[in-house]
Image (tube, rainbow, N blue to C red):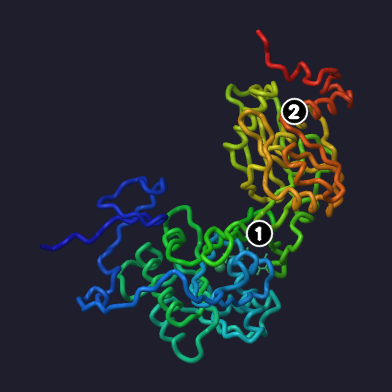
């Protein structure tokens, strides 16, 4: 009986269905299903019956060596990988087209090749001339990187099996690769998976490290990097706003290192520049002294990072007010707004609320709650916050300000950048004692912060923030009926 081997595979996540449907039930994307022949995904040679060999079973205890690492020559890249590329490991670098993946890898491979390692760069997307042109622009033409424009995985594997094993191989990009073992077109899930599998096998066999470049795609025309994420040892994501020069390299998965580290780069006319002190960068163009801005003392990985949060609270003309947020979790914003409204009497239901993290950074920490609340209230009452203060602390649903990790590191960074004051959770005061010479304003509940900011507004005595004597001014009290 002939078996139907055609199936519909989601090009985003790789889920397979028997018939076509508009939406992938697995990842929720629309229009990403494409028909693929999945028969050949396991090569015939592997499927053929053979007698299994026996192997020894090991215990957990035993001698292991630290994974030997190859430094990329770029501190920020090494930080994200956890100290360099591990021999025999496969790493996926994902990101939007044009974000700078090829630039980053051209720079890193050139530095490593100059250090005397055999480095191979396979470009499936660009012709040799284009890659050379980029290297020229970066001033790296003299680096002894071995270059090829190839897309056949079999050809690549047999070429690289000759001679000394390369220390690092870059495949730019995995979506352009194809292998003979499957029949689908290049760029489909089946092809991308099979090609990645062949390359991973090569890495494990020879001990060469491989970097796969993967374009993040929205339209499902080609398979996204998600389909190989689970097969590789580490996944790095290269992010940034198109209009901003800052690029953030983030470890999403890492079998050999931490996953919360970020590397910060700046795209310049001469390639990517490493930013070793990101706080300076994210604060460099501060709107000093504008109501609605607060500096958040955050932590990314092991590194403290100061960044400005900007809020705008304006009366709305809509029935349902707008809540827009860039760089932070919208549901955390909703939560902070709800706590302000329920416990601090700050009425925001008649206002549009906009919150922006400056510099195109994305914050994932709940510790930003307090800074966000400060920025929101500051904008609402049109009272400028002290320009020499930083804020951090998590807000609970009851309005209590809860402690967060790494208080001393946050304070030290703030002091280093010339800040004089820190607004922080009361319960973190012990941890912070004697630190960095900042004036500490430890608060226990969000109500205290709101009252303090409102008092600043009334002290200024301008028309938009009428003078009020109470700790919790009347304009914040809930509309008692
Ligand atoms: P690229 O590395 O080709 O992106 P990807 O491989 O992720 O698709 O980089 C593309 C962008 O970077 C391109 O728009 C030009 C810009 N760029 C610079 O601004 N400066 C440079 O020195 C280089 C090489 C590129
Ligand atoms: Mg590229």
Instruction: Look at mark 2 in the image and give the residue it sits on.
Output: 380
Q: Is residue 445 left or right of residue 20?
A: right
Q: Is residue 108 visible?
A: yes
Residue that appears at 42% across and 82% down: 157
What quarter of the picture does the C terminus occupy?
top right
Residue that appears at 62% across and 61% down: 249
Residue that appears at 39% across and 75% down: 198
Q: Residues within 10 Å of mark 2 (few under 14, many from 20)?
A: many
Residue that appears at 61% across and 30% down: 397
Q: Is residue 134 visible?
A: no
Query: Which quarter of the figure has residue 393?
Result: top right
Q: Nearer the viewer, residue 54 or 369?
A: 54
| C-alpha gap between disc 2 and disc 1 | 32 Å
How far from the left and from the top, in percent, is residue 54? Answer: 28, 78
362 lies above or below 259: above
Q: Which mark is residue 336?
A: none
How far from the left and from the top, in percent, is residue 68? Answer: 57, 77
How far from the left and from the top, in percent, is residue 413? Answer: 79, 53
Instruction: Look at mark 1 in the image and give the residue it sits on.
Output: 247
160 lies above or below 297: below
What quarter of the picture does the N terminus occupy?
bottom left
46 lies above or below 326: below
Q: Is residue 123 left or right of residue 33?
A: right
- Secondary structure at badge 1 equals strand
């Amino acid at each position: 009986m002939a078996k139907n081997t055609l199936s519909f595979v989601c090009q985003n996540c790789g889920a397979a269905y028997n018939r076509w449907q508009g939406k992938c039930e697995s990842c929720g994307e629309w229009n990403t299903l494409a028909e693929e022949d999945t028969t050949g995904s396991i090569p015939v040679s592997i499927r053929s019956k053979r007698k299994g060999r026996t192997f020894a079973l090991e215990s957990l205890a035993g001698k292991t060596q630290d994974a030997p690492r190859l430094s990329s020559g770029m501190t920020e890249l090494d930080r994200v990988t956890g100290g360099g590329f591990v021999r025999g490991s496969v790493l996926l670098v994902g990101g939007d087209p044009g974000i700078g993946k090829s630039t980053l890898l051209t720079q890193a491979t050139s530095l490593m090749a100059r250090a005397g390692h055999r480095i191979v760069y396979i470009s499936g997307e660009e012709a040799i001339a284009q890659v050379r042109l980029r290297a020229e622009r970066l001033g790296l033409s003299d680096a002894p990187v071995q270059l090829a424009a190839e897309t056949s995985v079999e050809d690549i594997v047999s070429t690289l099996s000759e001679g000394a094993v390369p220390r690092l191989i870059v495949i730019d990009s995995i979506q352009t690769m194809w292998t003979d073992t499957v029949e689908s077109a290049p760029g489909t899930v089946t092809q991308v998976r099979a090609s990645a599998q062949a390359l991973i096998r090569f890495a494990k066999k020879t001990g060469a490290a491989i970097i796969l470049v993967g374009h993040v795609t929205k339209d499902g025309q080609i398979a996204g990097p998600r389909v190989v994420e689970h097969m590789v040892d580490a996944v790095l994501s290269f992010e940034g706003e198109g209009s901003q020069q800052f690029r953030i390299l983030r470890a999403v998965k890492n079998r050999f290192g931490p996953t919360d580290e970020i590397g910060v780069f700046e795209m310049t006319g001469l390639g990517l520049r490493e930013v070793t002190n990101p706080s300076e960068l994210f604060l460099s163009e501060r709107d000093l002294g504008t109501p609605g801005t607060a500096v958040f003392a955050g932590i990314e990985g092991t590194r403290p990072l100061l960044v400005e949060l900007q809020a705008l609270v304006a009366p709305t003309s809509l029935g349902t007010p707008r809540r827009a947020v860039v760089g932070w979790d919208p549901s955390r914003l909703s939560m902070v707004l709800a706590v302000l409204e329920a416990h601090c009497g700050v009425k925001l239901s008649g206002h549009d609320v906009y919150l922006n993290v400056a510099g195109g950074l994305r914050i994932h920490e709940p510790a930003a709650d307090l800074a966000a609340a400060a920025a929101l209230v500051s904008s609402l009452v049109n009272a400028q916050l002290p320009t020499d203060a930083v804020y951090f602390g998590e807000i609970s649903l009851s309005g209590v300000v809860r402690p967060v990790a790494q208080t001393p590191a946050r304070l030290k960074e703030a002091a280093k950048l010339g800040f004089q004051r820190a607004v922080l959770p009361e319960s973190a005061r012990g941890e912070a004692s004697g630190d960095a010479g900042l004036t500490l304003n430890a608060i226990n509940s969000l109500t205290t912060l709101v009252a303090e900011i409102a008092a600043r507004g009334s002290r200024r005595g301008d028309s938009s923030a009428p003078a009020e004597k109470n700790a919790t001014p009347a304009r914040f009290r809930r509309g008692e009926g």
